[in-house]
Amino acid sequence: PHSHSEAMAIPSFAMGAVMGQKGSGLQSIEQRHHVKIKIDQDSNPKTATIFGPSDGAANAKAEIQSIIESRSRQAAKHTERVAVPEHLIGKFIGKNGSNIQAFKDSWDVGAYIPRTGPQSGQLCISGPFDRVIKAHE
């Protein structure tokens, strides 16, 4: 097996997911693919260089890429606004905010209804695109 190296950028939002707790994520990728991964902390975005057999390096790079893609989908914030009839706002919010909190918890999104300003009376739902769309429905 020839020694080979692959370099790739790792965006800051995905660094924690790639590294894992105390570097455990990186170590398990290294062990699974029989490679060594060096992270250049001084570059921006940070650069990972993967050393090892070409198939192992390519597979490790693909695994890291899929972690980055999954993080970027989670990081993508989306906001939807839904008009709430004035007489239903209190009912939607609930006593001490209990209903709106239950809505946020069940859909795993942020939600609020501004009392003043251009968006007053509109439920603002924010979070990852797929969950916001489901919550909006």
Image (cartoon, rainbow, N blue to C red):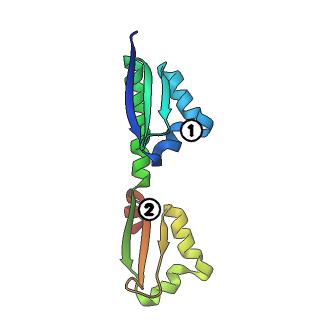
- SS under mark 1: loop
**Image side of residue 101 versus residue 59, left or right:** right
**Residue 88 against residue 100 in the figure, above or below:** below
Residue at figure coordinates x 37%, y 24% from the top left: 58
Residue at figure coordinates x 46%, y 49% from the top left: 13
Residue 45 image position (x, y, % from top left) = 41, 43
Amino acid type of disc 1? Gly
- Which tag is nearer the camera, tag 2 or tag 1? 1
Quarter of the image for the N terminus: give it. Answer: top left
- SS under mark 2: strand
Amino acid type of disc 2? Gly
Residue 21 image position (x, y, % from top left) = 61, 39
Q: Which residue is mark 1?
A: 20
Q: Which residue is mark 2?
A: 127
**Image side of residue 76 versus residue 90, left or right:** left
How far is mark 2 from mark 1, CA to CA? 23 Å
Is residue 137 in view? Answer: no
Q: Which mark is residue 71?
A: none
Ranked by sequence position, the earlier of labels 2 and 1 is 1
**Residue 67 against residue 54 in the figure, above or below:** below
**Residue 24 against residue 120 in the figure, above or below:** above
Residue at figure coordinates x 44%, y 62% from the top left: 127
Answer few, some or many: residues within 10 Å of disc 2's Cα (few below 14, many 20 plus, some between 14 and 19).
Answer: many
Say which of 49 and 136 sits in front: 49
Farthest residue to the top: give it: 1
